[in-house]
Amino acid sequence: MNKWSWIALGALLLGSIAVMFWVTGIGEEPEPLFESMDYVETGIPARDPRKLTVWAYGGGARQDNWEEQIAVFEEAIGESVDLVRFENAEGYEASLRQAAAQDKLPDLMLVNHRQAQELHGAGQLAPLALPASLAAEWADLTVESLRVPGSEESMMAYPADFSVLVLYYNRRMFDEQGMAAPGDHWSWPILTGIAKSLYRKGEGGRPTRYGVELPLGLELWNAVAAEYGAAVYADGAWLASDLTEDAPQARALKFLLDFYYTYVVVAPPTRGDTGQYFARDASAMAVAGAELIPLLTDSAVDWGVTFLPKQESRASALRLEGWAVRADSAKAREAAELALLLSSESRRAGWLPARLTEPVEEERLAVFYQQLESARPPPGVAVPTGARVIVFEEMKAAIEAGDTDPLGVVQKIGARLFPSAPKPTAE
């Protein structure tokens, strides 16, 4: 959409809000209504039924954007909004599950792909109409992943933000070695060779620079496996069972295990987001999402970004969040209006956390949008709860034990994911 289309959209949103304001006959000079609580770690905060309650997690620029748009909404509607901010994703997810179990969900909430599916399946989310004026603009993977299953016109949530895994690289380190920057022609074997050449050791054999930093776990495994020819999971099933050594999922897992145990040029695995070493100038490359960019804006690293390496095809991992409305909310209409406003503003801001923090070069941002075209949707309800943690723990244990047999690791993962599955009997 061009800028005039966005202006028209903004006028449409504010116009519809203004019409509701006029119809409801709310006073001409409403008091300051917005209330934002201090960070909450976990639990279910008390709700004021007179206010539209919004739950989200995190802070910084994302929070600033939410508060700005909520203030616009309140001024137009006259609706009091209570924004409850949780400190981190883990505490937020625990609180969301607790609230769902006790039927105490907020009117409007930030959800990821899996949470949206779970809450929709339990009948706890109100279906949201896909605006006809935005259907073409929103015709991408972020929207498709949040549609109500089997519906072309309803959504479980309006998209709030997305990120995809890409390859970051340190320009200075490549320049010093006279190496060309990574590009879309790179394969994983090329990355392996370059990572080896950029790895450095100091006195005592301790690394002073890692070749690359990787997000060990389910999403990268799934992306690499998809590039080899078959994903680890799809929205309808877990696909990494009864594998052979030649199966794409097994080959991808073997590659990742070898990267850590055999090549030993990769930064230590962590369960959270990667990029900590890269942002400290201690890794030449990093596979990470857009969440890394705010860290880089505060560092001295001269960085570039390009697509993930490819094999037979190109793939990546999509992370997705959206704004969902509680099904039985007394303020469902107002919550849906606010969800659409927040989603539209996120879209206008570039959909990436980076865009809401600091200006980022357009050529860098373009990589994320292009990588999105080959991204794999995040795990849905077909993937057992806790899969991310289980896969990380089993992969990390295998690396620490020097076990690079992918079939053995897959069996251990499967035994924890599906503990009730019948065990084979000896003949």
Image (cartoon, grey):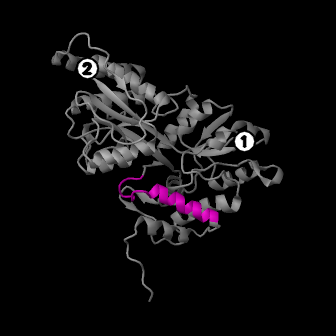
Say whether marks 1 and 2 touch (CB < 8 Å).
no
Q: What residue lies at 33% left-to-right and 40% top-to-bottom?
A: 44
Nearer to us: label 1 or label 2: 2
Q: Image quadrant of residue 326?
A: top left
Residue 264's spot in the image, x, y percent? 70, 57
Residue 4 horizontal side relative to residue 306, left or right: left
**Amino acid carrying mark 1 in the image:** Ala
Q: Residues within 10 Å of mark 1 (few under 14, many from 20)?
A: few
Please tell me which residue lies in front, 220 or 324: 324
Instruction: Tell me where residue 233 sits by quadrant.
Output: bottom left
Q: Vertically, is 53 above or below 416?
A: above
Which residue does the numbered mark 1 point to in the structure image?
180
Where does the N terminus fall, quadrant-wise? top left
Residue that label 2 marks: 77
Residue 385 inside the magenta-drawn segment: yes
Q: Nearer the viewer, residue 306 or 354?
A: 354
Report x, y in % for residue 60: 49, 29
What segment carries the magenta color?
Answer: 379-400
Observer able to see residue 65: yes
Query: Label 1 vs label 2: CA separation?
Result: 55 Å
Residue at 66% in and 41% down: 278
* Amino acid at dot 2: Ile
